[in-house]
């Protein structure tokens, strides 16, 4: 079913049906991240990374669900975990809703 998360936290994008992982990343001031589940090579990471599209480390352990982690300056260069990009939907765009009209009263 689209939009409903599986027990491991994965789901499908409702527009393009790509497999994604959506979760909060960080302990303080966490970000809600929606990431593709396709692992990227270092060359693919370089082309996919933009100021508004981050690359995440997808930590997978045998007895816990997959977790996204920040890739920061202390992240090991030879990390054995797959790295994934933030999801960019290629599906159809939802139609824009008509903005509400302002009221004609002062209060």
Image (cartoon, grey):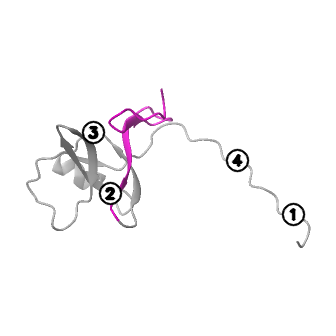
What is the spatial separation of the Cα atoms under label 1 and label 4, in whole angstroms? 18 Å
The disc, 1 or 4, on the residue closer to the chain's N-terminal end is 4
In the image, residue 98 lies in the stretch drawn in magenta: no
User: Which residue is nearer to you in this view: 84 or 81?
Assistant: 81
Q: Position of residue 44 (x, y in %)?
A: 23, 48
Query: As drawn, which residue projects farthest toward the top?
Result: 1
Residue found at the very far left of the displayed protein: 78
In this figure, which residue is indicated by the disc labeled 3? 38
Looking at the rendered structure, the secondary structure element under dot 1 is loop
Mark nearer the viewer, 1 or 4:
1
| Contact check, label 2 and label 1, Cβ < 8 Å | no
In the displayed structure image, the side of residue 101 where residue 62 appears, left or right: left
Q: Position of residue 3 (x, y in %)?
A: 48, 35
Residue hosting label 2: 54
Q: Residues within 10 Å of mark 1 (few under 14, many from 20)?
A: few
Q: Earlier in the sequence, mark 2 or mark 4?
A: 2
Q: Which quarter of the figure has residue 27?
A: bottom left
Task: Assess disc 4: are there few (<14), some (14-19) or many (≥20) residues with their C-alpha within 10 Å of its C-alpha.
Answer: few
**Alpha carbons under labels 2 and 1: distance apart:** 41 Å
Describe the element under mark 4 as helix, strand or loop: loop
Question: Which residue range is magenta in the image?
Answer: 1-27
Label 4 to label 3: alpha-carbon separation: 32 Å
- Residue denoted by label 4: 97
Q: Quadrant of residue 60?
A: top left
Counting residues from the start of the chain, the first of labels 4 and 3 encountered is 3
- The numbered mark at residue 103 is 1
Q: Residue at x 18, y 68 (%)?
A: 73
Specify which label sits upstream in the sequence, 2 or 1.
Answer: 2
The x, y position of residue 12, in whole percent, is 42, 34
Question: The C terminus lies in which quarter of the figure?
Answer: bottom right
First in sequence: mark 2 vs mark 3? 3
């Amino acid at each position: 079913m689209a939009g409903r998360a599986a027990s491991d936290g994965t789901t499908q994008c409702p527009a393009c049906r790509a497999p994604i992982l959506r979760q909060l990343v960080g302990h303080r001031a966490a970000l809600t991240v929606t990431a593709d589940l396709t692992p990227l090579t270092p060359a693919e990471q370089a082309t996919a990374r933009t100021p508004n599209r981050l690359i995440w480390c997808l930590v997978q352990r045998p007895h816990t669900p997959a977790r996204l982690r920040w890739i920061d300056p202390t992240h090991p260069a030879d990390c054995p975990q797959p790295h994934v990009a933030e999801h960019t939907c290629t599906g159809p765009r939802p139609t824009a809703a008509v903005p509400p009209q302002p009221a004609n009263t002062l209060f």
